[in-house]
Image: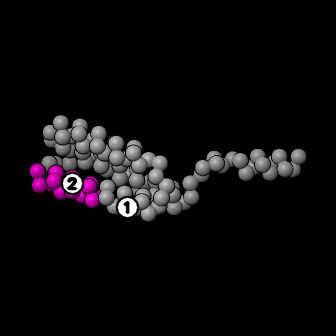
Amino acid sequence: MFASVHMMASSRLPPAALTLKQFLQRQKVLGLYRNMLRSIRLVPDQGDRIYLRDWARDEFKQNKNATNQDAIRMMITQANMHLDELQSSLALANVKK
């Protein structure tokens, strides 16, 4: 009886619960994804906008199940560079937010 109560208490968490570090990294990636899509919405040409939106979705979806922390950090850095480049291009094109 005691063993079953103990098992119930420990099974409340999902088996794949994230660590705090993983949770914070996940939040960073989701924020980056949202910022990327917000910036892409400002692209004036509809064809370019659709292409960039599909590209961003595909890149994030393709790496959705990545687990290597070093690779994830590298992908975050690359995505930030792409976002900065996009925002700089939009600023040069004088696109208002």
Tell me residue 57's x, y (percent): 34, 42
Tell me residue 73's x, y (percent): 40, 61
* N-term-proximal mark, 2 vs 1: 1
Q: Is 83 colored magenta in this rendering?
A: yes
Residue at 18 percent across and 36 percent down: it is 47
Please name the residue that numbered disc 1 is placed on: 74
Name the amino acid type tagged 2: Gln
Residue at 56 percent across and 58 percent down: it is 19
Name the amino acid type tagged 1: Met
Structural crowding at the residue carrying mark 2, measured as other residues with C-alpha within 10 Å and reported as few (<14), some (14–19) or many (≥20):
some
Image depth: mark 2 or mark 1 in front? 1
Span of residues in magenta? 80-93
Tell me residue 9's x, y (percent): 75, 49
Question: Is 63 on the left-hand or right-hand side of 3?
Answer: left
Image position of 38 with respect to 18: above or below: above
Tell me residue 81's x, y (percent): 27, 59
Residue 15 appears in the figure: yes
Secondary structure beneath dot 1 equals helix
Image position of 88 with respect to 65: above or below: below
Please name the residue that numbered disc 2 is placed on: 87
Q: Nearer the viewer, residue 88 or 73?
A: 73
Residue at 54 percent across and 60 percent down: it is 20
Q: Residue furthest bottom?
A: 70
Question: Is 24 on the left-hand or right-hand side of 42?
Answer: right
Q: Residue furthest left?
A: 93
Alpha carbon distance from label 2 to label 1: 20 Å
Q: Which secondary structure class fits the magenta region best? A: helix
Residue 24 appears in the figure: no
Residue at 11 percent across and 55 percent down: it is 92
